[in-house]
Image: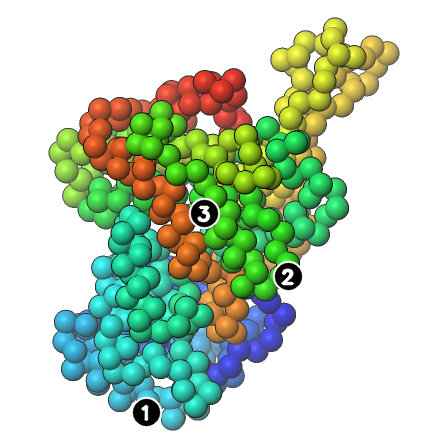
Amino acid sequence: MANGQKPDPCSFIIFGVTGDLAHRLVIPALYNLAATNLLPEKFCIVGVARKGMSSTELTDSLMKGLRQFATRKVDEALAERLLECVTCIEADPKDPSSFDHLKAQLERLEAARATGGNRLFYLATPPGAFAPIARELGRVGLLKEQDGAWRRLVVEKPFGTDLASAKALNSELQKLMDEHQIYRIDHYLGKETVQNILVLRFANGMFEPIWNRNHIDHIQITVDEKLGVGHRGSFYDSTGALRDMVPNHLFQLLSLVAMEPPIRFDAHSVRSEKADVLAAIQTQSEQEALHNSVRGQYRGGRIGDTEIEDYRKTEDVKAGSTTETYAALKLTIDNWRWAGVPFYLRTGKALGIKRTEIAIKFKQAPFAMFRDTPIDRLSQNYLVISTEPTEGIELQFNTKVPGPSINIDGVEMKFRYKDYFKAEPATGYETLIYDCMIGDNILFQRADSVEAGWQAVQPFLNAWHNAGAKGLKIYDAGTEGPEEADELLAHDGRSWRKLT
């Protein structure tokens, strides 16, 4: 987390404080920061709720959530010190006067808590509330930076539902505040291994010289989930796997793997390179998008001891829904480094294994001198960066089997974070929240990066929408997804890396 400096005094204002995100992730992350002495000395938490709730009731609810979802043993005294500063204020953008009340209450709290007027607004709300809340905050002057005090707005994903809505939301927010004040958060970037991609690439002389089209055959990015849609049927049926995962999570991984070296390690330089590589993704025609993609939907099956019902039987999912729960894409990047190197992306629900990884497949060495060795027994050379279920890095290569004959077999070298570093388990939000407090937005998406991601995805959205039920593949829950996803790579003479 940056350099471990203490953040400035501030108020941490959470919209949607009664929701799952605040209880499951945000408050446990704040607790972990408190446990590592990385919260400001002068600090207060303000929970904004639409319905009347006392500060005591909110504190009790957050404490209960912390005990349930904490990633480490809860020190009761520390938890009480953290949550004793919680204040609940009622505000709803449908009632503009409530934001005038919020401003007055907040100014009184800031004076009492000596937070210096620094404010971090965290929108842990459904996306439809982002713009209305920001408009009211702007109207009453709560977003304006003055007298040396900073004001920052944290926005959760999804940031828009397509290119047009992302542009509209960016435009709306940028009318209210400067770009440096907007923190578009993606919890994937809080994971140690994801951040380590930059270190792996740019701090090791052995990797960067071969990180290009001359040595890399293709790259696979996988985010597979065992869970079905569960109780999120209404949200998911209007969103789908592509919107839910690709423009944010998978493209964040892609941009870190594919970006050019930044001229320096600061927010502007790193975010500019990430935006540039996303802008370089080839924009496909609808016909090309259909050819270079697979979409699927799960039906009932079993995953371990759990029975998964058909997606279409899930509560709040429309009968006959054509929303995809699985998406696989083939993308290309039109720049010098990656010309001719395909990027294969896949993500899905209700699959047989939970796995998030980036697999970099290197080109095969010439086999002339080993012509008597069965080629299919030679291991493919992969560098695999995994974030779930275990964070680590793995290198696959060939070596000689001990004995008098020249027999070759594939082996693996594995690095696991938990084996080398005795860090406490975390939510993934600690680094991101801390960086918000110290004003370091290197791990957050900029407006141009968000729009470049949607620009690349839009042809697939259009093509799938126009195709309707045609082309939607059905797969059984607990499998690896639709068989057609294998054919997407087989057309190019390649195959997905086997997940274990």
Q: Is 153 left, or right, of 202 in this rendering?
A: left
Q: Residue at x 63, y 37 (%)?
A: 212
Q: Neighbour class for label 3 at 10 Å: few (<14), some, many (≥20)?
A: many
Q: Please, what secondary structure does the residue beneath circle 1 have?
A: helix
Q: Position of residue 368 (x, y in %)?
A: 75, 12
Q: Is residue 154 above or below residue 279?
A: below
Q: Quadrant of residue 258?
A: top right
Q: Is 291 left, or right, of 374 in this rendering?
A: left
The numbered mark, 2 or 3, whose residue comes first in the sequence reads 2
Q: Neighbour class for label 2 at 10 Å: few (<14), some, many (≥20)?
A: few
Disc number lying in front (3 or 1): 3
Could you say which is closer to the camera, residue 177 or residue 345? 177
Which residue matches tag 2? 264
Q: Are marks 2 and 3 in contact (CB under 8 Å)?
A: no
Amino acid type indicated by mark 1: Arg
Q: Position of residue 378 (x, y in %)?
A: 67, 17
Q: Residue at x 31, y 49 (%)?
A: 163
Q: Please, what secondary structure does the residue beneath circle 3 have?
A: helix
Which residue matches tag 1? 108
State the separation of the CA atoms marked 2 and 3.
Answer: 21 Å
